Amino acid sequence: MTVIIIAAVFIIALFAFNLIIRGLKTPRVSSTPREPSPPAPEKKDPVADFKEILDTLIKLNLLIRTDRDFSMDLILKIESIIDGLKALIPDMITRYPGETLTYELRKIGSTHLFKTVKEYLDLSLDSRQAQREAFEKTIESLHDVCVRSRQIVDNDETAEFETMARFLGGKFS
């Protein structure tokens, strides 16, 4: 009889412990009103959005053209990327505005390319020489991304959008 009572008390204790643990895991709802959440950000006008990207690309072009120590082969490669983005981003914004690939390409055009080149230009000449190979690989990779993205859009390969966007997100974000 004692064993049955001890077993019953043990089972009740386990049940109570389970209820306590569940109570700790559930979020508490306060009865006091909270501040209202901020309004959702307004959607940008695609034309204004592209204008900002274009301004960044123009600044970048001026930056590389005015640096006397920057090699002409790198200038031409970066200008090729700029031209590719200038042609590709408006198509993406108008045809596929909500796609992740559009977001990633806009990010490359608005910040990533400029930041990458600016960081390289801010290096001393000796540091540039030491970092040139890595910089060239990054620029070549961005060029390949522009070419492949153009192919995806021209061939309307919407199934490739997510794959390419994940690649860009992992590589350049």
Image (tube, grey):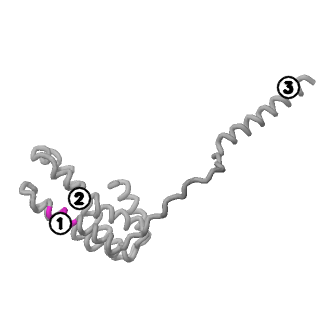
Residue denoted by label 2: 114
For the point 77% across and 35% down, which residue is it? 16
- Report the front residue among 171 and 99: 99
Asked if the residue at tag 2 contacts the one at tag 3, i.e. Cβ–Cβ closer than 8 Å, the answer is no
Circle 3 residues within 10 Å: few <14, some 14–19, many ≥20: few
Residue denoted by label 1: 79
Mark 2 or mark 1, whichever is nearer to me: 2
In x, y percent, where is residue 8? 86, 31
Whether 156 is drawn above or below 65: the answer is: below
Which quadrant, please, contains the N terminus? top right
User: Quick one: label 2 or label 1, which is nearer the N terminus?
Assistant: 1
Q: Is residue 99 left or right of residue 31?
A: left
Q: Is residue 81 left or right of residue 2?
A: left
**Element class at badge 3:** helix
For the point 44% across and 64% down, which residue is it? 41
Q: Which span is picked out in magenta?
A: 57-62
In x, y percent, where is residue 99? 42, 68
Q: Is residue 21 left or right of residue 167?
A: right
In x, y percent, where is residue 169? 37, 57
Which quadrant, please, contains the C terminus? bottom left
Circle 2 residues within 10 Å: few <14, some 14–19, many ≥20: some
In x, y percent, where is residue 154? 33, 76
For the point 25% across and 71% down, which residue is it? 86
Q: Amino acid at mark 2?
A: Phe
Residue denoted by label 3: 6
**Alpha carbons under labels 2 and 1: distance apart:** 12 Å
**Alpha carbons under labels 3 and 1: distance apart:** 81 Å
- Report the front residue among 120 and 146: 120
User: Quick one: label 3 or label 1, which is nearer the N terminus?
Assistant: 3
Q: Amino acid at mark 1?
A: Glu
Q: Amino acid at mark 3?
A: Ile
Q: Residue furthest right?
A: 1
